[in-house]
């Protein structure tokens, strides 16, 4: 007998097959006619398989009639056409129970739990409709990320997680150590880092960009996709201490190429989620955000707006809207400004570019005007910034000048400078936070609900 | 004019096309006939594109004749059939130089450098034949990993990198902290971990298995693929402090299913590398290991041997071979024993299973004999253990007994126990170290040469 997934057994092509299906009971409903309906799920699809268990089953009274949410079962039987909403159902010839879930103590009973409560049960929440759907959409986005870049001829690169550069400047870093904190070795009254595992202080990476540039400047088109860390004490619905980031980097690309890549990439993620997770997306539409599907459908067909920072500032200055933070050329745009631009002014995703030089890191290419750099941010409604990137400074003299401007020592970046010293090329790249993308697609409001085990200040459970 | 990759321009389908190719010079050879051959590579394939630059080019004397290894160029021209070994060549109508590489100072001149030396230049080594090939094969393996599991209906899960369980027991762990080591907060004379970022001591993960089990016990078939850490002070050619691991976990699978999955999975990786990286594999065959291709070809067609630990011990006891470590039932097999089994006795990959209970972690399922557990190791010639896995203990009473046996506190694993308390299922999984797999496929002897930026004791450069 063939092992079928719930997804397979629900398709009308399966009608007539003998099926062996394994999964967990979602609900049991006893019919007056002397049989029971079992709703079985195995994670392969949002929808459940309806199983009909007749009273003639030898364990009907002793077991089947005691099944409830969370019990694990194997079902043998025939797939039949169903008269109900679903295309098929299985008439069970055998029901085997593997594990019970005592309804008195099992936390996931039929009643709805708040998302906050479910965070405390991160080991059980994947068994709920919401987190099953989030997991499938997140998986779909990851698959699309790899498919997109592989189809375009990019090489997947693993940039290091532990780094000894404390100078990346993208945010506060976690220190990594094997020193015994209770007995730190000292030298001249200070902690002797030469005795640490790597012989010097080391940290968790905040970005794989600089290392990705190494590979782009050797092999052309590359991307990283891995965990990234911020030790910032920000307890918001948009920040995690540990999150996944995808960072493409392309030799010979300029900022326009970079914008086109970002747009094509995001549209692919959205299109795949809509087409490959339709049941899950319907669920998010019904339970979390009535606009989510129409928003995504619009975005994949429309061209993204491209707007220079300077023009965006003019729009904001002249729009008559009252902002908490006043707008003028040179300021770092706040969330309220970004939302005004995407949600009210353009009603579309917007790529802002050519930001003031003073706002951006040393590695972004300086424009001929001397005042701006070839930076870009992709903003989407509700979530705000979803992608940040730039064309990189490929001119060694300008790069070292920019480092000096920002009080960085060129010696610390000797290898980064070498990329410009030997066979330098124009190149560009960007970073997409996976969780922001999944939040945008699913409409989940809190970023802690789109990652399996969120790490936030004070919380590293499971 | 279309931007073509070197790979595309080398295919005979490209003949007749106007091409725009960008990359780096590998070599320049001047012909007596008054023109030059440029070998150009852009990472898209092992082989270079041959470009013919005629003296009539306006910058022929001033630039083209000064091009050397490492210089970056854009080439415009027509793709023509070639009389040489390669199918095509490009007759350049324009050569633009983007970046020079001074032959006096550029470290990668034509002469061969040792792999050790190249490790010091990890920012330049991707520009060499060897590391270009390693990068493409590693990329191919990663793509195959995702394709294999996605095609089989698995969900990709991100298990956490930072964990507060210091009790995983799989090896020494790195501590992660935001405390200022120079001013550690104390409480009762000890470091006050409640003031650390997560409110308690936290570490880098050694395995995502336990968290993968959470998802397998909710959604059926899942896999993790992410970085993993060992703070062990072992400076060998087979160990890294940071490496990538893929860990599938499947509800309702027993140990036999697990072995079949592992075998199918490995064969897929090897088959894809052979068929999708043929030029790179030929290079490894010629320069690193004359047996590598034939070994892989044999493995993908043969069934793996499955041999219980007890039988393997008998074979080793009776084989007459002199081992450094004597063999008897109950010992942990050493590399010399494993190599004897795969290389001399079976001449094949071998899956050993049913190991002594005392050798293995608490979570492996106890056999009815009471002496052994449902563990398995997949051994391959030369590399040794490449996969380790087991059927998990799904019976709560046996699990808690095993924890007690190993002096673990069930309270620390409350959520892991919950998986057995509510709807428990038989399940199984394993881990494959990505770098071991890439080592085996490429024949590279040192694991530091199959990861972009190796982290080892005393070394976290780049």
Image (spheres, coloured by chain):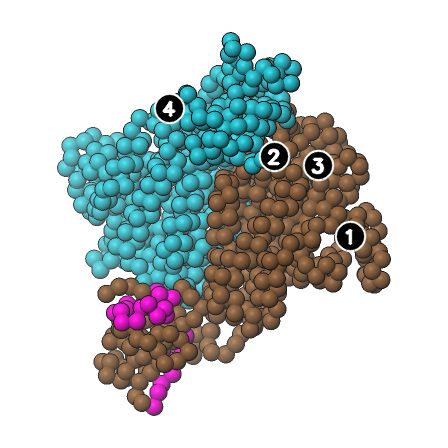
Chain colours: A brown, B cyan
Q: Residue furthest toward the top?
A: B32
> Residues at badges 4 and 2 in contact (C-beta under 8 Å)?
no
Q: Is there one chain holding both mark 3 and mark 2?
A: yes
Q: Is residue A408 visible?
A: yes
Q: Is there one chain holding both mark 3 and mark 4?
A: no
Q: CA distance from mark 3 to mark 4?
A: 40 Å
Q: Which residue is mark 4?
A: B287
Query: What is the number of the mark on residue A312?
Result: 1
First in sequence: mark 3 or mark 1?
1
Magenta span contains residue A28: yes
The nearer-to-camera label among 1 and 4 is 1
Q: State left or right for residue A245 relative to residue A82.
A: right
Q: CA distance from mark 4 to mark 2?
A: 31 Å
What range of the chain is rendered magenta?
Answer: A5-32
Q: Which residue is mark 3?
A: A365
Q: CA distance from mark 2 to mark 1?
A: 28 Å
Magenta span contains residue A14: yes
The nearer-to-camera label among 3 and 2 is 2
- Disc 3, SS: loop
Q: Residues within 10 Å of mark 3 (few under 14, many from 20)?
A: many
Q: Is there one chain holding both mark 1 and mark 4?
A: no
Name the quadrant of the N terminus of chain A: bottom left
Chain containing the residue with disc 1: A
- Residue at the image point whose x is 79% and y is 48% from the top: A310
> Residues at badges 3 and 2 in contact (C-beta under 8 Å)?
no
Chain containing the residue with disc 2: A
Q: Nearer the viewer, residue A235 or A437?
A: A437
Image coords of residue B428 (percent x, y): 33, 57
Q: Residues within 10 Å of mark 2 (few under 14, many from 20)?
A: many
First in sequence: mark 2 or mark 1?
2
Image coords of residue B30 (percent x, y): 52, 13
Q: Which residue is mark 2?
A: A252
């Amino acid at each position: 007998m063939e092992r079928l997934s719930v997804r397979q057994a629900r398709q009308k092509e399966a009608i007539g097959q003998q099926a062996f299906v394994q999964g967990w009971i979602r609900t049991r409903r006893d019919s007056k006619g002397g049989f029971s309906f079992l709703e079985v799920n195995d994670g392969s699809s949002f929808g459940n398989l309806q199983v009909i268990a007749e009273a003639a089953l030898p364990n009907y009274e002793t077991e089947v009639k005691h099944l409830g949410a969370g019990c694990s079962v194997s079902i043998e039987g025939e797939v039949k056409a169903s008269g109900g909403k679903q295309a098929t159902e299985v008439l069970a010839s055998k029901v085997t129970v593997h594990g019970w879930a005592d309804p008195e103590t099992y936390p996931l009973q039929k009643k709805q739990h708040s998302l906050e409560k479910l965070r405390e049960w991160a080991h059980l929440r994947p068994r709920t409709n919401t987190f099953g759907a989030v997991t499938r959409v997140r998986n779909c986005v990851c698959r699309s990320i790899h498919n997109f870049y592989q189809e375009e001829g990019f090489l997947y690169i693993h940039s290091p997680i532990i780094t000894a550069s404390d100078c990346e400047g993208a945010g506060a870093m976690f220190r990594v150590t094997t020193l015994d904190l209770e007995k730190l070795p000292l030298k001249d009254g200070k902690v002797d880092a030469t005795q640490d595992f790597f012989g010097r202080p080391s940290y968790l990476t905040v970005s794989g960009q600089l290392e990705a540039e190494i590979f782009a400047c050797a092999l052309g088109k590359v991307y990283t996709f891995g965990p990234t860390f911020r030790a910032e004490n920000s307890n918001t619905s948009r920040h995690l201490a540990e999150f996944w980031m995808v960072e493409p980097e392309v030799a010979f690309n300029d900022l326009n190429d970079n914008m086109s890549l970002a747009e094509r990439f995001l549209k692919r993620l959205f299109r795949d989620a809509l087409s490959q997770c339709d049941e899950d997306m319907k669920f998010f539409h019904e339970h979390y955000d009535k606009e989510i599907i129409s928003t995504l459908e619009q975005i994949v067909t429309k061209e993204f707006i491209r707007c220079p920072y300077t023009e965006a500032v003019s729009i904001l200055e002249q729009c008559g809207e009252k902002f908490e933070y006043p707008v003028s050329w040179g300021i770092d745009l706040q969330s309220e400004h970004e939302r005004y631009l995407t949600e009210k002014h353009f009603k579309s995703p917007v790529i802002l570019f050519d930001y003031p030089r003073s706002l951006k890191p040393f590695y972004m290419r300086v424009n001929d005007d001397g005042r701006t750099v070839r930076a870009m941010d992709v903003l989407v409604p509700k979530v705000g910034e979803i992608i940040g990137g730039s064309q990189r400074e490929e001119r060694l003299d300008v790069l070292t000048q920019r480092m000096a401007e920002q009080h960085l020592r060129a010696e610390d970046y000797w290898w980064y400078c070498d990329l410009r010293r030997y066979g330098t090329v124009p190149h560009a790249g960007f970073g997409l936070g996976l969780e922001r993308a999944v939040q945008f697609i699913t409409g989940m409001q809190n970023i802690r609900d789109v990652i399996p085990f969120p790490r936030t200040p004070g919380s590293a459970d499971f």
